[in-house]
Image (cartoon, rainbow, N blue to C red):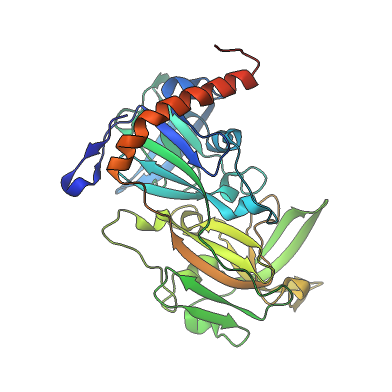
Amino acid sequence: MLLVLGAGGALASGPTTQFSLSGDVTRPGSYTLSDLQGLPATTQTVSFLAGSGSQTHTYVGTSLWGLIDTAGVITGSAKNDIVSKYVLATGSDGYKVVYSVGEIDPTYGNRQDLVAYQEIVGGVPTPLGADGFARTTVPGDMRGSRYVSNLMNLDVRASGSTRTGTGGGAASGFTVSGAVVHDLSIDASTNWSALGLSPITRTVTYLAGAGSQTHTYTGYSFWDLLNSSAVGIVTDPAIKNDLVGKYVVATGSDGYKALYSMGELSPTYGGDPAIFIAVSETVGGVETGLGADGWARTVVPGDGRGSRYVSNLVNLEVFSAAPIPEPQAWALFGPGLGVVGVLARRARRRAAGHWIG
């Protein structure tokens, strides 16, 4: 792995020959090109905006979720704890992107993100060139800002939320806090139009328990609320595409949490269909409240299960993912990755029934 120090000691862009998989997993390790080529492969054609034009690429790679799942995500005792976690992808230049585990897990959002290691050019598989030996892909995103080239690290993390709920039961409103310009409290007296938001109505179907549910909700765009002048997301103009390194945690009155990456909320990137905050439901042609789901709940159109629907919403918190370690730490950590990688590869081969000495 080549990590280059730029001016002021910051990481400078350089090619990588391996990346680490670390954080809240039971089997951390490192992956080289040969490791990736030994895993189940997927060929994927994607189109996205980059700069002033559109690009189309056909990539060969392995499933990002498959890597994370094989490493074994460590979860706590909280209900559906996995939907409160995220993956931080970091490139050799320090560029970082957050993916919520919920958006890539096939049980929920099922986004087919890859760790790509080849591109098909003229029918011939070729290396990725300036994009390094591996890069992430995000099919369906409008822009390529969540594609991380020269992949250096995948880190699975728990959210930074410390909210504990309000003891359960019906909630009459919620607050917006964290890395925002203005904290905001919202309840039945809120004038949504004064916030610049218009109502949207969507019919969603998802699995809950042992059966399927279909609801027609009316509410307001999650993204538009956060991006409104009444709230405003704090970003650092010195950090390239700082927004894609952020995430939001929704907390219910019972302490239940779900995490959404800012990239999946923003229409500039993956925000279609938009995640929104429902405040009413239409039943038998009559618009009514949400009943046991409280005054407001988050709704995630397209998810296979309702586990990222947070009922009795009491808080939305905006976070920035913690920075990667200092370059000196990577220099010390780098040799250890090789050892961890060997152990991880041995574990994978043993699991496949192949003994290795």
Give the residue at x 46% y 54%.
Answer: 263
In the displayed structure, 136 sits above or below 203; it is above
Q: Residue drawn at (56%, 12%), measured in percent from left and top?
A: 356
Q: Is residue 120 above or below residue 263?
A: above
Task: Classify residue 313 by image quadrant.
Answer: bottom right
Residue 109, image x, y percentages? 61, 48
Q: Position of residue 58 (x, y in %)?
A: 45, 30
Residue 244 percent across, percent down from the top left: 41, 54
Seen in the image, is 165 located left or right of residue 344? Answer: right
Above or below residue 342? Residue 176 is below
Quadrant (top left, top right, bottom left, bottom right) of the C terminus: top right
Q: Nearer the viewer, residue 7 or 334?
A: 334
Name of the residue lying farthest toward the bottom: 189
Res 275 quadrant in image: bottom right
Position of the N terminus by quadrant:
top left
Q: How many marks?
A: 0
Residue 187 seen anywhere in this rendered image of the structure: yes
Task: Identify the image quadrant of residue 105.
Answer: top right
Residue at 32% x, 41% y: name it: 329
Between 176 and 11, the one nearer to me in the picture: 11
Front residue of 108 and 84: 84
x and y, in percent, of residue 267 in the image: 47, 58
Q: Is residue 18 visible?
A: no
- Vertical placement of residue 30 versus 162, above or below: above
Please report the residue visible at 43 percent of the width from the left and 55 percent of the height from the top: 321
